[in-house]
Image: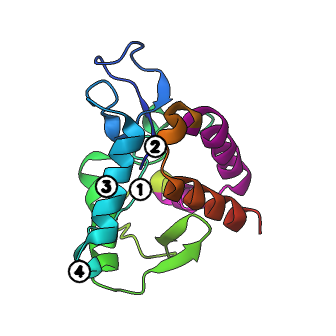
Amino acid sequence: GSEITAASTINAAEVGKIRRDPFAILPFCGYNMGDYFQHWINIGKNAKDQDKLPKIFYVNWFRKDENNADLPGGFMWPGYGDNSRVLAWIFDRCDGKDNYVDTPIGFMPKEGAINTDGLADYYKKTLPEITKVDKEGWLKEVKDIRENHYPKFGKHLPKELTACLDDLEARLSK
């Protein structure tokens, strides 16, 4: 989560600018974010029951395809109540259901794993693109994280984050 991008909010200097804002708390955190990350890494490492740690899922509800005139506002996913379709997949994953494919960036829904009953056809057509892994795009993200995000934390950057980024880059390069 330390590398997630989001549009900055009213609480940041430039509203709407896309930036890496871990957990959307940069304007509020009272100490070095590298130390903050290490704190959470340590909590995970020291947990008595690793199976009870929360599962983490990334979603991008706001991905756009400006070239597709059929999509309202260019959004590739309808959002709102339809997000429950993705949440149902997540809950099934947490319950151990075999509804995923393993990819270089983690588990993604198998074809047909997200309930599309009643979903507008143009959103059904975007699902393959939404769940596709763009290796070239991800490698650009890795490069940006390495060159522009991680240096901000200097000696406070946890080695575990660098190791995870190295592992991700290796998986994407296969």
Residue type, label 4? Asp
Tell me the residue at 31%/55% (across/down): 40
Say whether residue 128 is magenta: yes
Q: Is residue 134 visible?
A: yes
The amino acid at mark 1 is: Tyr
Q: Which residue is mark 4?
A: 49
Q: Position of residue 153 (x, y in %)?
A: 49, 35
Is 110 magenta? The answer is: no
Q: Main secondary structure of the magenta part?
A: helix
Alpha carbons under labels 4 and 2: distance apart:
27 Å
Question: Residue 4, labelled with which disc?
Answer: 2
Magenta residue span: 124-150
Say whether disc 4 or disc 2 marks the residue closer to the N-terminus: 2
Residue 70 in view (yes/no):
no
Residue depicted at x 68% and y 67%: 171
Q: Give the residue type that dot 3 points to.
A: Trp
Task: From the image, tell me which residue sits under label 3.
Answer: 40
**Image coordinates for residue 65, horizontal then vertical, percent:** 57, 39
